[in-house]
Image (cartoon, coloured by chain):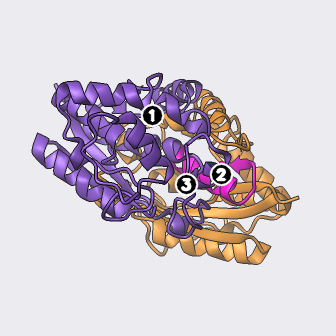
Chain colours: A orange, B purple
Amino acid sequence: MKDIVILYSGGMDSSVALYEHADRIRRALTFNYGSKHNLREMEYAARNCKRLGIEHHVIELDMNKMGFVSDLLQSGGDIPNGHYEDQNMIKTVVPFRNGIMLSIAAGIAESIGCDKLMISNHAGDHAIYPDCREEFIQTMNKAISLGTYNHCEILAPYTNLTKREIALIGKEIGVPFEDTYSCYNGLETHCGTCGTCTERKEGLEGFDPTVYLH
Amino acid sequence: MKDIVILYSGGMDSSVALYEHADRIRRALTFNYGSKHNLREMEYAARNCKRLGIEHHVIELDMNKMGFVSDLLQSGGDIPNGHYEDQNMIKTVVPFRNGIMLSIAAGIAESIGCDKLMISNHAGDHAIYPDCREEFIQTMNKAISLGTYNHCEILAPYTNLTKREIALIGKEIGVPFEDTYSCYNGLETHCGTCGTCTERKEGLEGFDPTVYLH
């Protein structure tokens, strides 16, 4: 039974979720929210959905025009290098991004008769992203359940896993990591130095098919 | 101090909130979400913001393209007549609309340094709109607080008031009700028979400046 609407960026974490739960996924949503790397990510997202026969929708949500402030957005400053937990990475936080994407996914799920939403937040996000932490997901889950007729439920299977643990699940089930994209800079080749590239390298160490600039 | 971002449709309830709290409102957001009456509402919303000197932003969010199903949307069927609590009005529910608008408002508020969101849900909405009820607002409030750095708080001053009670507040403070718009059909003149027109007539009875077709 296909009962899940998944938030799917085309990055490595949500790609592992997409492959792991493919038989239950009714629709994958990729948000074109105006980040520097959105257009690149979307190509990869579309490719994996096509391969798995999963319906793929791009949601247009231009946060630049809406007045959001973040260096991750096209309207923001340069992308900093380093780890997620570094203080300078805070400038790449898009305020309440997960809350917004989960809310829209809830409305779409209810519209098409699904009652499960999947998001691939993980333990490595917790330091600087308040809307990736377990308590947020649990409370948002309750709010969405109360605010929908079909009491939509959030599934967040990787909330307490590290990126390395997610990568190992992906390796086990044969996720084609060469067809996933992480770089915040949105270049054709992964830069290798931004926050997500740094985390990606560490997660995939030993079986990383990615070509990096640095 | 201007610390509030308000969800402002241009209808009578949120117009009363706009006038009542004008001195604290930093920005008013009107969502062009693809309903039949959005374009008409927005003219009224812009007019009231201009009169009060409040910054007004239109948020483009085409729910028709996103795959939402509701008779309130341009992609939906005819608007039914009657009261909000009537069962046939359920077809006009836009799934999780308030959750979505509050989430986007939270991200914008955090981006511009505000920590209050205002929404004008009221007791008359409770019957058929799960995302207008007090328990939803309280839980969503907690989720938004957990998911933002500045712990944004939802203000929902009319949650337990009837539309009549809101109208009386508006009368008291001199809200120009002739410059507010309610009709779900989006006609130049209020139809007088759809759910919101029916509620509007009852709310403004005795001091209603509205011209209705029926």
Question: Please, what is the dominant secondary structure of the magenta stretch?
Answer: helix
Mark 3 packing: few (<14 Cα in 10 Å), some, or many (20+)?
A: some
User: Which numbered disc, 1 or 2, marks the residue closer to the eye?
Assistant: 2
Residue at 57% over, 75% down: A43
Q: Is residue A106 magenta?
A: yes
From the viewer's perspective, is residue B86 above or below residue B149?
below
Q: Earlier in the sequence, mark 3 or mark 2?
A: 3
User: Which numbered disc, 3 or 1, marks the residue closer to the eye?
Assistant: 3
Q: Which mark is residue A122?
A: none
Residue at 38% over, 34% down: B203
- Can residue A25 be seen from the camera position used here? yes
Q: Which mark is residue B88?
A: 2
Residue type of the residue flagged with mark 2: Asn
Q: Which residue is mark 1?
A: B121
Q: Residue A15 placed where, x, y %?
A: 69, 60
- Can residue A205 be seen from the camera position used here? no
Q: Which residue is mark 3?
A: B81
The chain carrying label 2 is B
Residue type of the residue flagged with mark 3: Asn
Q: CA distance from mark 3 to mark 2?
A: 8 Å
Front residue of A140/B183: it is B183
Front residue of A188/B190: it is B190
Q: Are marks 3 and 1 in contact (CB under 8 Å)?
A: no
Residue at 72% over, 77% down: A50
Residue type of the residue flagged with mark 1: Asn
Q: CA distance from mark 1 to mark 2?
A: 20 Å
**Residue A185 vs residue B128: left or right?**
left
